Amino acid sequence: MEFHKILIAIDNNPSSELVALSGLQLAQQYHSEIALISIPEADSSIDYDPPTQKEEDDMMEHNLNANQLRVIEKVFKDYPVKSFVAKGVPYKVIIETAEEWGADIIVMGTHGRKGLPHLLLGSVAEDVIRHSKRTLVVIPVIDSLK
């Protein structure tokens, strides 16, 4: 099996670097193209006058673009990378992007949440595993909610 295109799903956590590094190692092995995908999440824990939808979209996209730039600079110094930022249900956006871009494999992390945090937050990786027809590599990462 060969992987010509690898889609790496990252979030706004420092663990994104570990996931990206794993994807890079796979890409180097197969001489693959790489794309990063990030899906902004609204922060509902802040209590203030909410921004307009456009302001919120701009802030989320800016933060994720900044995170993608940080990961690209730190992990993909000499390796070309394409970048996607998309809104929507994370697992659906990841699968749709993989299909549209023609990814052979998806690399993503799982925070390994259990109990109440898993019940409340769900698992994007679990949903991608259940619904994607693509090969999937899931990297376990440390999460502060454990």
Image (tube, rainbow, N blue to C red):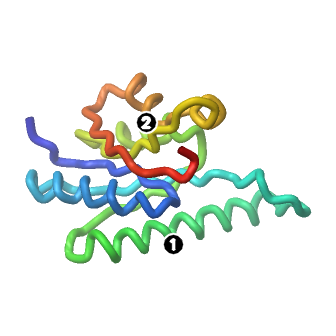
- Amino acid at pointer 2: Ala
Residue farthest to the right, as pictured: 49
The residue under label 2 is 125
Instruction: Tell which of 60 and 12 is nearer to you.
Output: 12
Left or right: where does residue 100 sit relative to residue 121?
left
Nearer the viewer's eye, disc 1 or disc 2?
A: 2
The residue under label 1 is 66
Circle 2: element type: helix
Quadrant hosting residue 125: top left
Q: Quadrant of the N terminus?
A: top left
Residue 87 rendering spot, x and y as whole percentages? 59, 48
Circle 1: element type: helix
Instruction: Tell which of 58 and 90 is nearer to you.
Output: 90
Quadrant hosting residue 120: top right
**Which one is earlier in the sequence, the residue at label 1 or at label 2?**
1
Residue 84 rendering spot, x and y as whole percentages? 44, 57
Residue 133 rendering spot, x and y as whole percentages? 31, 26
- Amino acid at pointer 1: Ala
Marks 2 and 1: in contact by CB < 8 Å?
Answer: no
Q: Residue at x 54, y 53 (%)?
A: 144
Q: Residue at x 25, y 76 (%)?
A: 77
Q: Residue at x 48, y 68 (%)?
A: 67
In the figure, 66 relative to 145: above or below?
A: below
Q: Residue at x 29, y 69 (%)?
A: 75
Instruction: Tell which of 110 and 130 is nearer to you.
Output: 110
